[in-house]
Image (cartoon, rainbow, N blue to C red):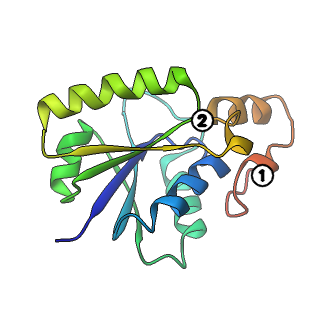
Amino acid sequence: MQKIALFPGSFDPFTVGHESLVLRGLPLFDKIIIAIGYNSQKKGFFPLEKRIEWIETIFQDEPGVEVTWFSGLTVDFCRKKNASYILRGLRTSADFEFERAISQVNNAMAGDIESVFLLTRPEHTFINSSIVRDIIRNGGDASRFVPPGVRLD
């Protein structure tokens, strides 16, 4: 049986921290599905199609990575994709508390789906999509915080 992990998020935009987690997760799983959560009631900063294109470009040479989008519950999408694991990154203790609560709810709904947490590399701890969006909104250069495949112009 293949070990398939779902890496869910808004990835608005995809950062070097996200890229690092996927690359570090690849040896642990046979396949990682990067799944962009889509909510029709919310408008993303970058269009969904652009985010998918960026991530596909970043991992074009990684056969163990699939990029897609979903709406609804993450555990339901895991079942649809035969993913037994949810991959998440932890930057801070606040992330841990938030992710722990979500993991426990997911476990109550789907006990067969396990959450796997990787600690963010120290050099990526301060990077998150909200900060990168703020830099872009205010005309700053955010290129050092996103992988080369993400073109912010």
Question: Going by the image, does 136 lie left or right of 47?
Answer: right
Q: Quadrant of the N terminus?
A: bottom left
Q: Position of residue 124 (x, y in %)?
A: 69, 43
Q: Residues within 10 Å of mark 2 (few under 14, many from 20)?
A: few
Q: Give the residue pinned by disc 2.
A: 45
The front one of 22 and 139 is 22
Q: Position of residue 54 (x, y in %)?
A: 59, 60
> Is the C-beta separation of discs 1 and 2 under 8 Å?
no
- Check disc 1 and give the amino acid type: Asp
- For the point 38% across and 40% down, which residue is it? 38
Q: In the image, which disc is placed on residue 114? A: none
- Secondary structure beneath label 2: loop
Question: How many numbered marks are there?
Answer: 2
- Check disc 2 and give the amino acid type: Phe
Q: Residues within 10 Å of mark 1 (few under 14, many from 20)?
A: few
Question: Going by the image, does 45 lie left or right of 99?
Answer: right
CA distance for labels 1 and 2:
13 Å
Tell which circle, 1 or 2, labels the residue nearer the N-terminal end.
2
- For the point 49% across and 31% down, which residue is it? 43
Q: Give the residue pinned by disc 1.
A: 153
